[in-house]
Each structure stands twice: as C-alpha cells, then as structure tokens.
Image (cartoon, rainbow, N blue to C red):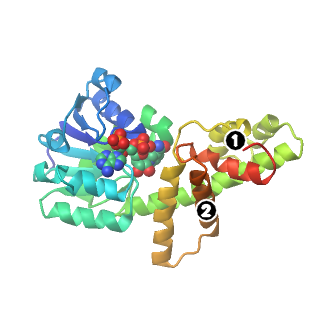
Amino acid sequence: MAEPVDHVAFLGLGTMGAAMAANLAAAGFAVHAWNRTRRPFDELGAAGVDIALTPAQAVATADVTVVCVSDTPDVEAVLFGPGGAAEALRPGSLVIDCSTISPSATRAFADRLAERSVAMVDAPVSGGSEGARKATLTIFVGGQAEAVERARPILAAMGRTITHVGPIGSGQAVKAVNQVILAGAYIGVAEGIVLAMKAGLDVEQVVGALSGGAAQSWVLANRSERMIANEYPLGFKVALHHKDLAIALELARDVGAQLPVTELAERLEVELMERGHADDDVSALARSIRGRSGLPD
Ligand code: NAP
C-alpha cells in the first residue's frame, strides 16, 4: 500500500504548469515549485505555492515531482542536466511527466530514474489553458499500475478524465494520436470558415447552425470566433503544436502509418513560424487558409 502523498514538487510554471500547480495547492498539497526563468509568480504565492530557487530544492522533500516543460530535451535538462532534479529526488518517490514529449525518450528517462529507485509515469494532458485553469484536463497515463495509482490523487487535482492507457510511454503515444486528430480538426474548421466567408454567408450564423450537427467539435465551438476575427490569442502555441506533430510523425514512421493531413499541418505551421507566428494560438492555421483564399491573414 503506497504512502499518502503530502509534498509535491512542480517543475515548469508556464501557461499550463502555473495553473496546474495552483490547483494542486488548492487541493491541499504542499507544493514547492520551480521555474527556469525567475518571475514574481505573485498569484502562485497567493495560492500557497512555495517557489524554490533550484529543481533540487523543489524536489528535496517531495513524494511526487510533476514536470511540465516544453519538449523532450527540456524534460531531459530539468531531470538530468547540470543542477537537475534527479540528483536530489528521493528514492521511492515518483515523477509524473505532464509535458508532451517523445514516447521512446520517455521510456529511456524512466529507465534512468529507475536506476535511482524513482518511479515514473507519463501523463500528457489535453484540454488547453482553459482546462489547466479549471482543473478539467483530460490526462493519458502510461506506467506500471502501482505507480499510476500513486499518481491518481495528484492527477485528479489537475484533471477530470484520467485514463491509464498502458505501460510507460503509452500516454505520449495517445497524446500523439490526439494531436493528429486536432490537426485535422483545425484545418477542417478553418477551411469551412473561409469557404463560408468567400461564399458571402453569415459566418456566425453558419457556426451556430452547424453546432447541433455532425460537424460540431471543440475546435468549432471554441476557436471559430478567432478564425473569423483573424486574431489568435493563447491558447496553445503554434510552436508547441508543431513540436507535437513532429513527435507524431516520428511515431508514424516507426510504426509504418501514413498521415497526409498531419504532414500538411506540419508544413503550414512551419510557414506560420517563418512568418513570426510561432507564439500565436494554433487556431492561426486559419491564417494559411485565409491567405491562400485572398482574405487578410
Ligand atoms: P509554455 O507556456 O511555453 O511554458 C513552457 C515551460 O517550460 C516554462 O515554464 C519554461 O520555462 C519551461 N522550460 C522550457 N524549456 C526548459 C528547459 N530547457 N529547462 C527548464 N524549463 C524549461 O508551455 P505550456 O503551454 O505551459 O506547455 C507545457 C507542456 O504542456 C508542453 O509540452 C505542451 O506541449 C503541453 N501542453 C500544452 C497545452 C496548452 O494548451 N498550452 C495543452 C496541452 C499540453 P521558462 O519560463 O523559463 O521559459
């Protein structure tokens, strides 16, 4: 029977991590958090989150360490780089990686942590910055059953739908599937909006009319307004979605799957980043469709 979790370290206080750490504190965990770039983090302080100066300081008393940083090399740096958490992680403790990274690297990181008697689960999330703030994230968890059960109270404080999908790395593979489906949804909604605009339809009315039918989706409900206005506040950065599609395409190559729409989305996102839109919300894929159709982009 696992010990109850009291102390949680949280490494990475970006758009997602800051909100998730605040929700852990609100749920009653003692949270020691760290971020690479030092900022005031006043709201987190007010929420009861203690800000540590180094990863080692944050994890020193932790039963569980949550990581939420950008990409595979960043998780490696935070865990195993100079001054990284691994040196100070307590044997017997658990690492929950909520970043979206490569499934194969995840398995390698878990092996390296196991050498220090530290367990790991991968727990990438879906549901956007809204889901992080409202603690309604959907979480795909990979790992051994016992570690996943230890992680569950922590995950339940940050998310609503938590599914154990298989061994370590499986959460990241499911997240890749999620991002592939989303790529198609963004492109499909953007194309529909542009077609409605070019056809002279009342596009807001079209969105309302479609919302009860088979074309309804999270992207249609939550991002079509931005595509119509051609304004893309965060959100989820184009650069991060592009990173996720690279992970998905690598997995596809490994397993012999062909993903033509994902390849298209990846190319359009490269164009957007080259035009300076890396930090736009990923709904900015509509810029590419608008521009090709002679609309302001
Ligand atoms: P973000 O706002 O860009 O924040 C990234 C965080 O990672 C920051 O705290 C950043 O620290 C830290 N970081 C990056 N590289 C690092 C390194 N080498 N060493 C130490 N810290 C590093 O990103 P986010 O939106 O919170 O996303 C975090 C993760 O969640 C990503 O894997 C993303 O794909 C995933 N995700 C995001 C969303 C979303 O809607 N935003 C949804 C689902 C999943 P600094 O402040 O010092 O830069």
| Residue 39 percent across, percent down from the top left | 32, 30
Residue linked to disc 2: 267
Direction from residue 109 to residue 100 in the image, left or right: right
- Amino acid on which disc 2 is placed: Arg
Say which quadrant the C terminus sits in. Answer: top right
Residue 262 relative to residue 29: left or right = right
Residues 268 and 59: in front is 268
Q: Residue at x 51, y 53 (%)?
A: 241
Q: Is residue 289 left or right of residue 70?
A: right
Please give the name of the residue rendered at 18% of the width and 49% of the height, measured from the top-left corner. 85
Q: Residue at x 73, y 52 (%)?
A: 289
Q: Position of residue 266 (x, y in %)?
A: 58, 61
Rendering coords of residue 103 (x, y %): 37, 65
On the image, the x and y values in percent for residue 174 come to: 45, 60
Q: Measure the alpha-carbon separation of dots 1 and 2.
A: 19 Å
Q: Secondary structure at mark 2?
A: helix
Where on the picture, by quarter, is residue 9? Answer: top left
The relative height of residue 168 versus residue 25 in the rendered view (above or below) is below
As helix, strand or loop, the secondary structure at mark 1 comes to helix
Q: Amino acid at mark 1?
A: Met
Along the polypeptide, which appears first: circle 1 or circle 2? Answer: 1
Query: Within the displayed image, which quadrant is ligand 1 positioned in?
Result: top left
Extreme residue toward the front, this view? 275
Q: Is residue 168 visible?
A: no
25 w.r.t. 273: above or below? above
Q: Is residue 197 visible?
A: yes
In this rendering, the label closer to the viewer, 1 or 2: 2
Q: Residue at x 45, y 32 (%)?
A: 134
Task: Read off the residue under disc 1.
Answer: 227
Label pair 1/2, CB-CB below 8 angstroms: no
